[in-house]
Image: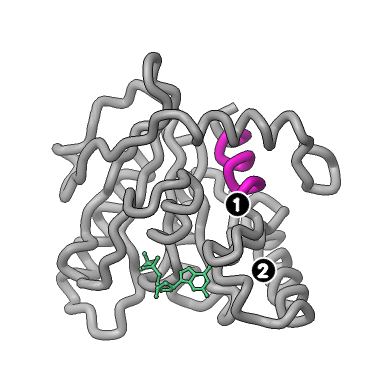
Amino acid sequence: MSDDGTFDEDAIEAARKLFAGPVSFLKSAPSLEFIPDAIVPEVAFAGRSNVGKSSLLNALTGRNSLARTSNTPGRTQELNFFNVGGDPLHMRLVDMPGYGFAKAPKDVVKKWRFLVNDFLRGRDVLKRALVLIDARHGVKDVDREILEMLDKAAVSYRMVLTKADKIKATDLADVTAATAAEARKRPAAHPQILQTSSETGLGIPELRAAVIEAIG
Ligand code: GDP
């Protein structure tokens, strides 16, 4: 990546090629005893429910229904693992359970906290998290909980704005600046903010390159 935060053509093309190859669902883990062996680098996706995480994972991998969209709190308390690359396996994507359900029972929130915290602290192949932020709302307190967990676990992360097509360009510039200001205050946050839309494809090539960059 260059100093201004853009990716060069080679990085974009390498990332496009990787995700044009095999990508497949591996397994869901409702607790750490079910997670797969740590054999390749991983990049995790986090975000509040309805932020557009499933849509973005599908856009990233160019598959329509790899990540299932589900807004049922009970169904989302799992870590979902996806293999990227065939033989040899290149990396894994981890879809972390969504958070911020208005009506989530206390024990569901507690379970989410334990599962995510244990995963973040104990997974040495986890190279980076991408934390999705709805461009219409910017960073909210429900997002700050995961940002703090990542800072404390010293897992590097990047904030990614979703649904950029839903707001005006001037508002997008404002929310990007505000999110960058939030990132500057946080020790494990990458200073550059990505703008994406699963609807228009905005930022998807860059998001792919950001995933590849993260696994080095
Ligand atoms: P998740 O709960 O975070 O997995 O969110 P989903 O991917 O299921 O998306 C939630 C809702 O937002 C769905 O109705 C999607 O169609 C919509 N959505 C997701 N991404 C975008 C986007 O980039 N643009 C627009 N306009 N809508 C989106």
Rendered position, 185 above or below 32:
below
Rendered position, 90 above or below 48:
above
Name the quadrant of the C terminus. Answer: top right
Identified at 22% across, 53% down, the residue is 78
The percent coordinates of residue 6 (x first, y second) are 78, 46
Q: Is residue 197 magenta?
A: no
Where disc 1 sits, the SS reads helix
Location of ligand 1 given as a quarter of the image: bottom left
Report the amino acid beneath label 1: Ile
Taking the image as shown, residue 78 lies to the left or right of residue 155, namely left
The percent coordinates of residue 119 (x first, y second) are 31, 44
Front of the two marks 1 and 2: 1
The percent coordinates of residue 116 (x first, y second) are 31, 53
The percent coordinates of residue 33 (x first, y second) are 14, 37
Crowd around label 1: few <14 · some 14–19 · many ≥20 (10 Å): many
Pointer 2: what residue? 179
Q: Of callouts 1 and 2, which one flags the residue occurring earlier in the amino acid sequence?
A: 2
Residue range highlighted in magenta: 204-213
Could you tell me if residue 67 is visible in this image?
yes
Report the amino acid beneath label 2: Thr
Measure the C-alpha gap from mark 1 to mark 2. 19 Å
Identified at 44% across, 23% down, the residue is 90
Pointer 1: what residue? 204
Name the quadrant of the N terminus. Answer: top right
Q: Is residue 208 magenta?
A: yes
Nearer to us in this view, 75 or 152 = 75
Q: Are marks 1 and 2 in contact (CB under 8 Å)?
A: no
Query: Which secondary structure type mostly characterizes the magenta part of the structure?
Result: helix
Where disc 2 sits, the SS reads helix
The residue lying furthest to the right in this view is 3
